[in-house]
Structures are given as structure tokens and as C-alpha cells.
């Protein structure tokens, strides 16, 4: 046979009498349809199946389905990144003339999306301290259609009272969207507490292996109608290989997160004992954290994998600590398998002025630690190694 008639031609799969235990990867961009009617029925959603990868594929389905079950959600979808999940939420729920109310300590890019970018589409945004329930209720106007808060905010780890925010949103008839990235469904299931939509950056602890950028949006049927169309029309779809990797990461998420939460609590207690080199420790698991009781109730006895602390000596002390803590890579993300650290002033919060950062409690000496799955002794010794550099 002529190679040009053989090589490009997709052959039928061999007969499979058994089921693969690990899910196959389906990297195909397009599927062969039996006839136009079948394609029409699938594209209209009357028939299950796949035609074009941007509209859906089995690896996204498998990952979304696991996340849907973890969140007890009616619907779930995988997006190209956590930011894409937030963009899908914004574009599916809001239109020109609407107002969105945002927590004042959200991830910087979320502010950029709902502020600068949404403003270009005629959507207004204001911020409020979502830990202050009275102020939050008072900031809702007749134009407000969506309230966005983070379960655990970055970097000082304030905890949102999701059930109370859901009650405010329900009474005022607006959509509550929770960014649950720092908590994950292992600690918190915002939909079960009354939220309408939940998003997570799967890039972080849910995948947990630093090899994928992906997002999750899950929610109630009532807020879902535009979601699939927005994902497809704006092209915010996911790659099959990334979904496959994240599905594998997710298989151990509960074990990794539980271990990392235990390590984080131990690290927070160790850092607390390091005064005067360490002046403040922020962790919802510490009794002195202002929302410790709420966190204990809402998260079922675990408090997250991130610990933030402040070094005496400001930026020079942070530089010295980061250089000396050789076993803790300086990676401005979180949720990796191993313990990493970030410096909010120069990374996540660099877009803010010094005064704005000071108002949020962030200084040059603020370090954000994402605690991993090593032994507690390793984490303690790796921190001690960095702190010893401050003694000279
Ligand atoms: C709280 C939070 N939400 C959303 C995002 C965006 O996720 P991604 O980087 O997957 O787009 C991040 C990323 O750091 C985050 O920390």
C-alpha cells in the first residue's frame, strides 16, 4: 500500500474485551461522526458524546466528574486555568451595567479581572471586607449581581464565613462565588454551605505536582445555563493531557492535603516559638487567629496548608532567610508536593503600593510558606536553617 494512504489514516481501535484500569488519554481535537444528524444532536446536547475538543472531551469529563462529586455539585467544568474559571464565572453571570462585589483581599489577578478587565465590558466592581458581614450586606446595591470571596485569603489567611455570606446573597438575590483554592474540597465544600458557584485553581494542591495549569468551576444548575457556551465561545477549554495529569494528582489529594495540614500546624507552632526573629505568625489553626473558631467549625478540624509569618528586620531579613533556607525553594505559587515559600511584596502583591500593602498587613518581612508533605522534622529543620541566618 502507498504510505500516503496508510500513514495519515486513523485506524479503528482494536477490540477491547477488558477495561483499562488507568484512564486513557484522548488527545484528539476532533471526533469522526457517523452522520450529520449525530453531529447535530451532539452539538445541540441532545446526545452524549464528543465532536470537537473545545466543546468537551473525556479527560475533562472524568476530572470534572470527580470534582463534582467532591463538591456535591450539580454541575462542574474544567477550564484552562484558575483565572479562566473566574473569567467563565464573570462572563456567564454578569453583563454590562451589572455590579460585582469583591472581597478586598482577593488574589491580585482576580482584582485585575473583575476591576480593569470587567470595567472595559461595562461591569462595575467595588471591594469590601467580606469578613465584616454588616459591611458586606451594606455594600450590595440593586445593580449587584455577584459576590466573590475567598475561603482562605492570601497572604494573611483571613477566613470567610461562607454560610453567612450565602445567607446574605440568598436574601439579596445575588450569586455567591467562592474561590476555594486555598481550602480545597478536602477542607471546605462551599456549595454545601449555600454558595452558588465555587472555583478552584487546580494548579495548586488539587493537582499538587507543579506540572499543570487548570481550573475548576462547579455550581448549581440554576446558574449554569451560560457556562458551557462561555467556555467554548471564549476558548477557555482544557487540554486532555493536563486533565489526565490532574486526575492522577487528585487521586492522592486527600492524603497529601491532610499530611500538609498537619505539617502546617506544626510549622506554625514552631514559628511562633521563634520570637523575636519571627514577630507574627498567621495561621487559622492557631488559637489566637481572629477566625480560629470559625475555621475549626467550617473546615472540620484542619486549617490549610499555608502559613504566613513576619520576620523582624523587614526586607533585608526576608532576603537573608530566603537565601539561607536552602531546602525551601522560593516558588511564587503554592500547593506543591514539597514545602515552598513566596515573598508577597515582590510577587503576588507587587502591583500594590507600599501603603496599600501596609493596610493589608504585608511588609518586606512577610513570608508565605506553602507547606508540603515532607516529615514535620524536615519542615522544622528547613525553617530553622533559614532563621539561623538572622542571628549574625
Ligand atoms: C486564590 C487564587 N485564585 C485563583 C488563582 C488563579 O489560578 P491559576 O494560576 O490556575 O490561573 C490563584 C493563583 O495563584 C490563586 O492563588
Image (cartoon, helix red, strand yellow):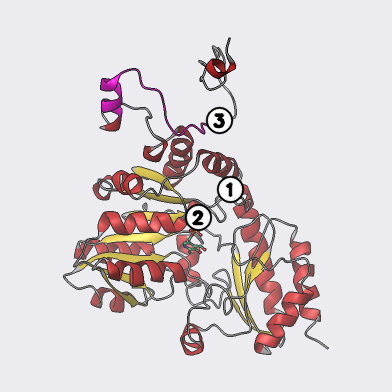
In the drawing, what numbered circle is on residue 23?
3
Q: Closest to the observer: 83 or 362?
A: 83
Secondary structure of residue under mark 3: loop
Mark 2 near mark 1, Cβ–Cβ under 8 Å?
yes
Q: Residue at x 40, y 49 (%)?
A: 236
Which residue is found at the position 77% from the left and 68% from the top? Answer: 382
Q: Indicate the quadrant containing the N terminus: top left, top right, bottom left or bottom right.
A: top right
- Disc 1 designates what residue? 253
Residue 27 part of the magenta-drawn span: yes
Question: Magenta stretch containing residue 333, yes or no?
Answer: no
Which quadrant of the structure image shows residue 274? bottom right
Residue 39: quarter of image: top left
The reply to whether the C-beta atoms of the residues labelled 3 and 1 are less than 8 Å apart is no
Residue 190 at least partly seen: no
Q: Is residue 98 visible?
A: yes
Q: Is residue 104 left or right of residue 292?
A: left
Question: Is 88 situated left or right of 264 in this image?
Answer: left
Q: Which residue is mark 2?
A: 184
Image: magenta residue range: 26-42
CA–CA distance in space, label 3 to label 2: 23 Å
* Ligand 1 lies under 8 Å from the Cβ of mark 3: no
Of tags 3 and 1, the one toward the viewer is 3
Q: Earlier in the sequence, mark 3 or mark 1?
A: 3
Mark before the other along the chain sequence, 2 or 1: 2
- 3D distance between C-alphas at marks 2 and 1: 9 Å
Give residue 332's position: percent from left, percent from top.
Answer: 61, 67
Q: Which mark is residue 175?
A: none
Amino acid at each position: 500500500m502507498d504510505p500516503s494512504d496508510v500513514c495519515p489514516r486513523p485506524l479503528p481501535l482494536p477490540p477491547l474485551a477488558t477495561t483499562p484500569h488507568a484512564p486513557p488519554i484522548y488527545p484528539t481535537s476532533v471526533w469522526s461522526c457517523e452522520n450529520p444528524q449525530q453531529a447535530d444532536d451532539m452539538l445541540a446536547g441532545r446526545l452524549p458524546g464528543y465532536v470537537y475538543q473545545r466543546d468537551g472531551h473525556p479527560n475533562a469529563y472524568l476530572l470534572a466528574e470527580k470534582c463534582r462529586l467532591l463538591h456535591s455539585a450539580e454541575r462542574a467544568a474544567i477550564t484552562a486555568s484558575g483565572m479562566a474559571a473566574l473569567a467563565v464565572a464573570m462572563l456567564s453571570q454578569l453583563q454590562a451595567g451589572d455590579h460585582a462585589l469583591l472581597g478586598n483581599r482577593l488574589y491580585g489577578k482576580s482584582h485585575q479581572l473583575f476591576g480593569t478587565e470587567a470595567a472595559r465590558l461595562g461591569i462595575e466592581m467595588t471591594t469590601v471586607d467580606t469578613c465584616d458581614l454588616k459591611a458586606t450586606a451594606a455594600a450590595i446595591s440593586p445593580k449587584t449581581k455577584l459576590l466573590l470571596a475567598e475561603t482562605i485569603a492570601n497572604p494573611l489567611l483571613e477566613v470567610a464565613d461562607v454560610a453567612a455570606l450565602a445567607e446574605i446573597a440568598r436574601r439579596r438575590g445575588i450569586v455567591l462565588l467562592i474561590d476555594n483554592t486555598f481550602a480545597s474540597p478536602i477542607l471546605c465544600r462551599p456549595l454545601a454551605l449555600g454558595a452558588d458557584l465555587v472555583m478552584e485553581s487546580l494548579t495548586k494542591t488539587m493537582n499538587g505536582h507543579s506540572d499543570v495549569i487548570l481550573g475548576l468551576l462547579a455550581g448549581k444548575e440554576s446558574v449554569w445555563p451560560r457556562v458551557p457556551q462561555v467556555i467554548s465561545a471564549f476558548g477557555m477549554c482544557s487540554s486532555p493531557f493536563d486533565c489526565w495529569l490532574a486526575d492522577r494528582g487528585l487521586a492522592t489529594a486527600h492524603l497529601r492535603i491532610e499530611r500538609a495540614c498537619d505539617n502546617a500546624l506544626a510549622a506554625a507552632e514552631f514559628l511562633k516559638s521563634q520570637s523575636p526573629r519571627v514577630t507574627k505568625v498567621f495561621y487559622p489553626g492557631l488559637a489566637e487567629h481572629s477566625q480560629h473558631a470559625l475555621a475549626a467549625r467550617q473546615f472540620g478540624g484542619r486549617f490549610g496548608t499555608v502559613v504566613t509569618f513576619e520576620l523582624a528586620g523587614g526586607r533585608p531579613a526576608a532576603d537573608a532567610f530566603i537565601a539561607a533556607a536552602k531546602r525551601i525553594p522560593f516558588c511564587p505559587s503554592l500547593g506543591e508536593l514539597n514545602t515552598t515559600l513566596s515573598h508577597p511584596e515582590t510577587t503576588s502583591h507587587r502591583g500594590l503600593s507600599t501603603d496599600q500593602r501596609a493596610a493589608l498587613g504585608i511588609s518586606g518581612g512577610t513570608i508565605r510558606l506553602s507547606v508540603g508533605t515532607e516529615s514535620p522534622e524536615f519542615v522544622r529543620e528547613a525553617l530553622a536553617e533559614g532563621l539561623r541566618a538572622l542571628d549574625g
